[in-house]
């Protein structure tokens, strides 16, 4: 985009399963100014030019993961991507690959969510009573948090899956999102479910199918590194198959039940006259 340009052409991929037999591109002229995002452009089109345009959005601040799409053939969050980043008067917008298209730019992320659910993305404990009715916190040191923290920033936008060449060639591949989260929970010192999760990741369409292209980590808009998580997951699986693995017990509640909670000393309340 020229520095003072105030209009760009949006070339948007359209597809309405009720009307269209094939995908086609449609052009719209969109006014822009400094800071205008791809999502702003799409909202302008929907409100002023064509109300039938379908795309997904919610938070508009890079948190909810709804607005992933291909912008000039690379996956981005539309709300987090400014038009001027592309230095072009033409912006091409398409739906994320490796997911079925529902309509126009909206894709079906349910297959990814199903794979995410399949790896049990929650803390698994043996102390079920404490889980159901917590009485205290679980003890966790800063370096134990660091072991999984960056992987917990995943917003499930599907961008890593859309960038992954293995997901493109194997629809059953668990994919970088689910495998990255599999490692995130296995690496959590509060968790006791690594054994059952690693069995899921050690399947025909699991972690060993990752060829370490690294495209997932390159594309992730939140700076998560799922490719690294998958390699750490492979190491955990190899160690477990050799009879190794975590020997220490998962994090205990703190303070332990035998200790009473320290009482907070409240100074006596007095009113000054
Ligand atoms: S609208 Fe929520 S991440 Fe873009």
Image: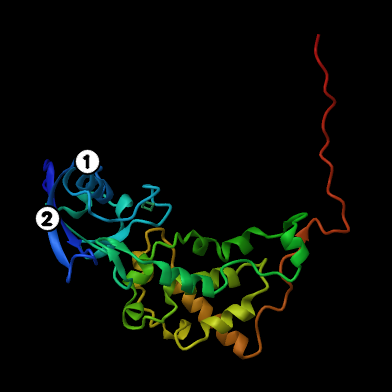
Mark 1 and ligand 1: say if the CB distance to the nearest ligand atom is below 8 Å: no
Q: Which residue is more in the foreground, 234 or 170?
A: 170
Q: Residues within 10 Å of mark 2 (few under 14, many from 20)?
A: few
In the displayed structure image, the side of residue 132 where residue 221 appears, left or right: left
SS for tag 1? loop
Tell me residue 55's x, y (percent).
29, 56
Disc 1 vs disc 2: which is toward the camera? 2
- Furthest toward the bottom, the residue is 242
Q: Residue 69 lies in what quarter of the image?
A: bottom left
Tell me residue 130's x, y (percent).
76, 61
Q: Residue at 13% across / 51% down in the picture?
A: 28
Query: Which of the image's four quarters has the C terminus?
Result: top right
* Residue 3 in view of the camera: no
- Furthest toward the front, the residue is 18
Q: Which residue has dot 2 on it?
A: 27
Q: Residue at 36% across / 66% down in the picture?
A: 108
Q: Residues within 10 Å of mark 1 (few under 14, many from 20)?
A: few
Q: Which residue is more in the foreground, 130 or 235?
A: 130
Q: Residue 22 lies in what quarter of the image?
A: bottom left
Tell me residue 181's x, y (percent).
51, 69
Q: Is 228 rendered above or below residue 42?
A: below
Q: Which residue has dot 1 on it?
A: 34
């Amino acid at each position: 985009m020229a520095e003072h340009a105030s209009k760009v052409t949006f070339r948007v991929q359209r597809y309405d399963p009720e009307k269209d037999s094939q995908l086609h591109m449609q052009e719209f002229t969109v006014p822009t100014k400094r800071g205008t995002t791809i999502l702003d452009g799409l909202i302008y089109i929907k409100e002023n030019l064509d109300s039938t345009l379908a795309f997904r959005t919610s938070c508009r601040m890079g948190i909810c993961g709804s607005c992933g799409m291909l912008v000039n053939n690379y996956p981005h969050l539309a709300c987090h991507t400014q038009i001027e980043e592309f230095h072009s008067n033409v912006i091409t917008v398409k739906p994320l690959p490796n997911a079925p298209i529902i309509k126009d730019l909206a894709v079906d992320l349910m297959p990814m969510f199903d794979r995410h659910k399949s790896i049990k993305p929650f803390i698994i404990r043996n102390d079920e009573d404490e889980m159901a009715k917590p009485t205290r916190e679980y003890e966790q040191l800063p370096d134990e948090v660091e072991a999984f923290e960056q992987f917990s920033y995943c917003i499930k936008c599907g961008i890593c899956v859309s960038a992954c060449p293995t997901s493109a060639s194997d629809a059953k591949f668990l994919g970088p999102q689910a495998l990255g989260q599999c490692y995130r929970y296995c690496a959590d010192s509060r968790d006791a479910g690594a054994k059952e999760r690693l069995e899921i990741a050690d399947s025909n369409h699991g972690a060993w199918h990752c060829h370490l292209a690294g495209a997932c980590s390159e594309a992730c808009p939140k700076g998560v590194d799922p490719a690294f998580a998958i390699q750490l997951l492979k190491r955990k699986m190899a160690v477990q198959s050799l009879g190794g693995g975590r020997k220490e017990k998962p994090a205990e509640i703190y303070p332990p039940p035998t200790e009473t909670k320290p009482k907070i000393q409240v100074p006596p309340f007095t009113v000054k006259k």
